[in-house]
Structures are given as C-alpha cells and as structure tokens.
Image: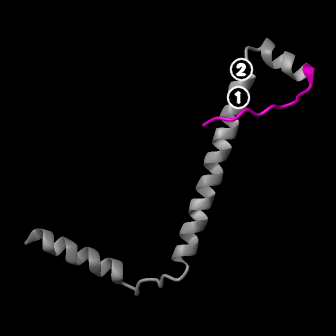
Amino acid sequence: MYTVIRVKIKEEIKKELEKHGIDISQEVRKFLEELYIKIKAKEYVNKWIEELKDVKPSKKGFSTKSIREDRERDFM
C-alpha cells in the first residue's frame, strides 16, 4: 500500500533541480526508502544486542579446541 506525502520547498530550489534533470519525486522517495532501511537495521541491531546481553562468553581456548576437533574429525 502506498500513501501520498506533500513537501514544500522554495521555488528556486525546485527550478534549479528540474533544470539539471533531477526527478524530485524519485529522489525524495529514494531518500525516504534508504532512511527506512537504516532505521530498520538499527532496530534489528538493538534487538540482537538486547537478546545477546545475557549470553555468557565462551571459556578461553574454546574456539581453538573446537576447530581442532572439527579438523581431526574431517581427517578420519
């Protein structure tokens, strides 16, 4: 679903942009869509941070031990 948004700008700005072949509606739409994506990304990151805040870190050496076990299993 779409909605209509009206924006007021100075006539001088509108004329200059149109003179240079800029599609104002397209540029405004693109800007708002990119802003939406950034906002949603920030929300997801904040959600992940919140979900991971109670996760305890792995013990020291866990990654090295786990990789070694995987490699040894692959050779067998």
Q: Residue at x 68, y 26 (%)?
A: 26
Tell me the tag on residue 27: 1
- Where is residue 22 drawn, in percent x and y? 73, 19
Q: Is residue 37 left or right of residue 12?
A: left
In terms of secondary structure, where does tag 1 sit? helix
Q: Is residue 16 left or right of residue 55?
A: right
In front: 50, or 19? 50
Amino acid type, mark 2:
Asp
Q: Is residue 49 magenta?
A: no
In front: 61, or 26? 26
Quarter placement of the N terminus: top right
Amino acid type, mark 1:
Glu
Quarter placement of the C terminus: bottom left
Q: Is residue 4 magenta?
A: yes
Q: Is residue 57 left or right of residue 21?
A: left
- Where is residue 42 drawn, in percent x and y? 62, 58
Tell me the tag on residue 23: 2
Q: Residue at x 76, y 34 (%)?
A: 5
* The residue positioned farthest toward the bottom in the image shown: 59
Q: Residue at x 77, y 14 (%)?
A: 20
Above or below, 60 relative to 64: below
Q: Which residues are magenta?
A: 1-11
Q: Residue at x 10, y 69 (%)?
A: 75
Q: Is residue 46 left or right of residue 11?
A: left
Above or below, 60 relative to 42: below
Question: Is the stretch drawn in magenta largely helix, strand or loop?
Answer: loop
Above or below, 61 relative to 47: below
- Where is residue 16 drawn, in percent x and y? 85, 17
In terms of secondary structure, where does tag 2 sit? loop
